[in-house]
Amino acid sequence: MKKRRDINIPTEEEFERASKHMAARIRLGDKLKEMISSECSSSAIYHDVYVWPLKGRCHVDLFVKTKEDKKSEEAERLREVTSRLLSENIQENYQITVDLDSHERVEIEFNGSYYNRFR
């Protein structure tokens, strides 16, 4: 193992290990997104889902079509289904959060830009 010149610069081994962890999180996020989409896409109000597996927690942004849909019992059912799928498919010690939003709000408040919505 090489000695570090500066404590703030990761070694090649540390960088490789971090890259593997990041790739595993991306794969987990893709797997969870696919599962949630598959389970929820039959709902008339479902629009899309974004999954953010982070260290020790997993955050999900679940989007329904309209602001009114967000207030519906069906939206709450989608949130519960999403939480259940996450609980069943990720490590037990992960903190899980599921936020509900609407595509309509993204269109109105962020000019349709999900990039700006997530900033």
Image (cartoon, rainbow, N blue to C red):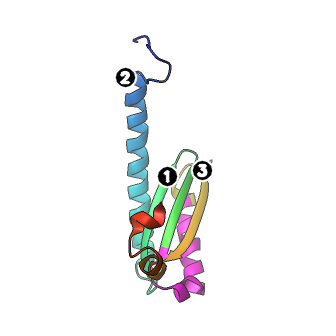
Question: What's the amino acid at mark 1?
Answer: Pro
Residue 90 in view in this figure:
yes
Residue at left 44%, top 78%? 103
Residue located at (46% from left, 60% from top): 51
Q: Secondary structure at mark 1?
A: strand
Q: Which mark is residue 94?
A: 3
Measure the C-alpha gap from mark 1 to mark 2. Answer: 24 Å
Give the class, few, some or many, for how many residues have Cα within 10 Å of label 2's Cα (few <14, many ≥20): few
Residue underneath mark 2:
12
Q: Nearer the viewer, residue 23 or 70?
A: 70
Q: Are marks 1 and 3 in contact (CB under 8 Å)?
A: yes
Q: Nearer the viewer, mark 2 or mark 3?
A: 2
Q: Are marks 1 and 2 in contact (CB under 8 Å)?
A: no
Image point 47% across, 60% down: which residue? 119
Which region shows up in magenta?
63-86
Q: Position of residue 86 (x, y in %)?
A: 53, 60
Q: Residues within 10 Å of mark 3 (few under 14, many from 20)?
A: some
Does 101 appear above or below 21? below
Question: Which residue was labeled with disc 1?
Answer: 53
